Image (cartoon, grey):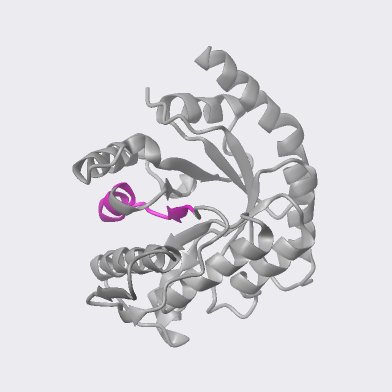
């Protein structure tokens, strides 16, 4: 049974609809009061019914004091170029006192991405582009690195780019990954794996872990460096099942996808303490 050594954490996954605009902010504040560790938001820049996620993350960070913030996950083809995204993330991290994480995806809903001006990529191209972007993002964050930043990729290139600013803490990069190529990239380059449980086949978490762990070792990394996160939906997972995912599959971050205040409150009051108790008992 894998134990990646990461503390058990809980978060919420909110859909930033703009009716009313204050609703996602209020739910984020509620999440903070209930003790959740961080709050995440969907990113669909091609939908007019959604507030811009990056603007929302900044606003939520300014209206809260403790809780972390992240996209779940940011649509890389519409959050370009990567060097500018790196500076945006570092700026948010500095302004929030080290509360930003960077959830990234290779892209999806390509018709909608292309309709609003993004470049359509094949799945393999999307993985390659994301890998190049990660190198650029980390290079920008390395404010003390030698000279200007040079990355000459097929999809993204920077030549002599200024480095910095350095973020307030080491911002983790979490990748939304459901296919083997993306999971391999998680193992090579990312700090966390962030899939959604309803999109996975039975046993998918264990299979993904194996791919990620093998890719990490091949890249000279310790698989324990990689946090295992999981989006879950209300009513689908009992405390016993979440405990099994934590103990047997090494999931340490459970992210509840709901915009229902009652569901969020009940999860915090009932499920979170039950899972913490069960996991502690299983591991002792």
**Residue furthest to the left:** 218
Vertical side of 260 occupied by 48: above or below: below
Q: In front here: 20 or 226?
A: 226
Q: Which residues are magenta?
A: 172-187
What is the quadrant of residue 264 in the picture?
top right
Q: Residue at x 74, y 48 (%)?
A: 31
Q: Quadrant of residue 122?
A: bottom left
Q: Is residue 33 left or right of residue 49?
A: right
Image spot of residue 51 (x, y percent) = 66, 74
Q: Nearer the viewer, residue 58 or 26?
A: 58
* For residue 130, above or below residue 225: below
Please report the residue visible at 56 percent of the width from the left and 40 percent of the height from the top: 254
Identified at 50% across, 63% down, the residue is 166
Residue that extends furthest to the top in the rendered view of this protein? 284
Q: Nearer the viewer, residue 167 or 30?
A: 167
Q: Is residue 27 visible?
A: yes
User: Is 156 displayed left or right of 62 in the figure?
Assistant: left
176 falls in the magenta region:
yes
Tell me if residue 150 is in the magenta stretch. Answer: no
Q: Is residue 168 left or right of residue 210?
A: right
Figure check: 170 above or below 25: above
Which quadrant would the N terminus be assigned to in this image? top left
Count of marks, rendered view: 0
Residue 176 rendering spot, x and y as whole percentages: 43, 55
| Residue 248 image offset from top left, x and y in percent | 42, 25
């Amino acid at each position: 049974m894998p134990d990646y050594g990461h503390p058990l954490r809980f978060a919420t996954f909110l859909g930033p609809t703009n009716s009313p605009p204050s609703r996602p902010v209020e739910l984020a504040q509620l999440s903070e009061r209930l003790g959740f560790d961080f709050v995440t938001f969907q990113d669909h820049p091609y939908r007019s019914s959604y507030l811009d996620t990056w603007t929302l993350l900044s606003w939520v960070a300014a209206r809260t004091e403790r809780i972390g913030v992240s996209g779940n996950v940011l649509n890389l083809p519409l959050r370009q170029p990567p060097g500018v995204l790196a500076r945006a993330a570092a700026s948010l991290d500095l302004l929030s006192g080290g509360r930003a994480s960077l959830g990234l995806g290779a892209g999806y809903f390509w018709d909608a991405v292309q309709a609003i001006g993004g470049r359509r990529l094949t799945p393999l191209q999307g993985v390659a582009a994301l890998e190049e972007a990660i190198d650029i993002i980390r290079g920008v964050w390395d404010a003390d690195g030698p000279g200007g930043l040079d990355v000459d990729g097929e999809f993204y290139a920077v030549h002599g780019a200024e480095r910095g600013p350095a973020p307030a803490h080491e911002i983790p990069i979490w990748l939304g990954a459901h296919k083997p190529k993306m999971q391999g990239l998680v193992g090579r380059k990312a700090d966390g794996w962030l899939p959604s449980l309803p999109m996975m086949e039975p046993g998918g978490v264990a299979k993904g872990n194996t791919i990620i762990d093998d890719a990490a070792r091949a890249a000279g990394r310790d698989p324990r460096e990689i946090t295992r996160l999981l989006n879950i939906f209300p009513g689908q997972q009992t405390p016993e099942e979440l405990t099994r995912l934590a103990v047997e599959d090494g999931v340490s971050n459970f992210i509840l996808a709901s915009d229902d205040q009652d569901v969020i409150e009940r999860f915090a009051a009932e499920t979170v303490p039950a899972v913490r108790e069960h996991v502690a008992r299983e591991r002792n």
